[in-house]
């Protein structure tokens, strides 16, 4: 068997191991689903009537349609937390050391983790979308746009998993991993267009929010699905959100992929 075929086979094995492991940890799946539904219900009904959208009638349904793509994007950005915690847990339990002792491609440990977490987040997205339909969110541009949006979300989840791998291999415990990821990602999700139009932010924050990958991913989904997106500016990210999001995917994987691999190799020394 060639090295490439061996690497692909090992990656598939590790991916399947991580996916089947979730079935033996139903509590993580249940709480992940509950947390996703709570996000939708809280923001849709608690804030939906209090945050009018500029240029739209004062009807909460418009904010809910505006909100849901942002909730999807926020969930995928926080996908790094799942990966980081999983990697830290495997290191702490000695599972990574066992993998290194086996005659398998070392790249399979990291790529298998990233692929399995994409599968996990795909399941969470299904729950979120069903919850969104219940509260009034809908897609206006057809099935092909739905597929394109979901594909973009999963691609971004893959990119964020490499950030999670890098973070997870650099902290000593699961508790620290949880705190580090939360502290890192929370500002990224809130300084964005997820919950409010960028134009309502302080002027000095607007360029940061405009180029924020959470904003470009959110605006890409709103564009693809025909959901409200008030005050689209003439800036490059606002006019080309899908292109900028794809660029962010390349940048994140290009930066944190090699950094994660280097940190993993340094553990072997």
Image (cartoon, grey):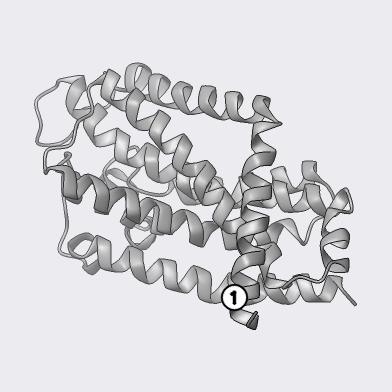
- Please say if 37 is above or below 80: above
Residue in the foreground of this view, choosing between 99 and 3: 3
For label 1, the SS is: helix
Residue in the foreground of this view, choosing between 242 and 16: 16
Instruction: Locate the N terminus by quadrant.
Output: bottom right
Residue 77 seen in this snapshot: yes
- In the picture, measured across the screen, residue 249 lies left or right of residue 105, that is left
Q: State the image coordinates of residue 109 (x, y, percent, origin top left).
A: 70, 63
Q: Residue at x 54, y 45 (%)?
A: 186
Instruction: Locate the C terminus by quadrant.
Output: bottom right
Q: Residue at x 32, y 48 (%)?
A: 150
Residue 219 seen in this snapshot: no
Q: Residue at x 38, y 49 (%)?
A: 192
Residue 71: quadrant of the picture: top left
Q: Dot 1 surroundings within 10 Å: few (below 14), some, or many (20 or more)? A: few
Residue in the foreground of this view, choosing between 191 and 5: 5
- In the picture, measured across the screen, residue 10 lies left or right of residue 39, that is right
Q: Which residue is mark 1?
A: 5
- Please say if 18 is above or below 158: above
- In the picture, measured across the screen, residue 101 lies left or right of residue 165, that is right
């Amino acid at each position: 068997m060639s090295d490439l075929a061996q690497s692909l086979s090992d990656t598939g094995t590790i991916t399947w191991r991580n996916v089947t492991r979730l079935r033996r940890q139903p509590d993580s799946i249940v709480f992940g689903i509950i947390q996703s539904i709570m996000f939708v219900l809280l923001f849709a009904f608690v804030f939906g009537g209090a945050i009018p959208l500029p240029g739209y009638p004062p009807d909460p349904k418009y904010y809910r349609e505006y909100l849901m793509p942002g909730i999807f994007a926020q969930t995928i950005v926080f996908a790094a937390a799942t990966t980081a915690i999983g990697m830290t847990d495997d290191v702490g339990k000695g599972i990574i050391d066992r993998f290194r002792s086996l005659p398998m491609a070392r790249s399979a440990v990291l790529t298998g983790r990233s692929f399995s977490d994409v599968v996990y987040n795909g399941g969470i997205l299904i729950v979120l979308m069903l919850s969104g339909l219940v509260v009034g969110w809908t897609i206006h541009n057809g099935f092909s746009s739905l597929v394109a949006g979901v594909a973009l979300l999963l691609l971004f989840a893959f990119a964020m998993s490499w950030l999670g791998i890098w973070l997870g291999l650099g902290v000593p415990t699961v508790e620290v991993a949880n705190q580090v990821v939360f502290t890192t990602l929370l500002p990224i999700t809130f300084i964005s267009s997820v919950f409010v139009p960028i134009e309502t932010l302080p002027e000095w924050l607007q360029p940061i929010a405009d180029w924020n990958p959470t904003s470009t991913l959110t605006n890409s989904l709103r564009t693809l699905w025909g959901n409200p997106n008030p005050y689209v500016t003439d800036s490059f990210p606002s006019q080309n959100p899908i292109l900028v999001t794809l660029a962010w995917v390349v940048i994140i994987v290009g930066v944190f992929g090699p950094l994660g691999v280097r940190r993993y190799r340094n553990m072997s020394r």
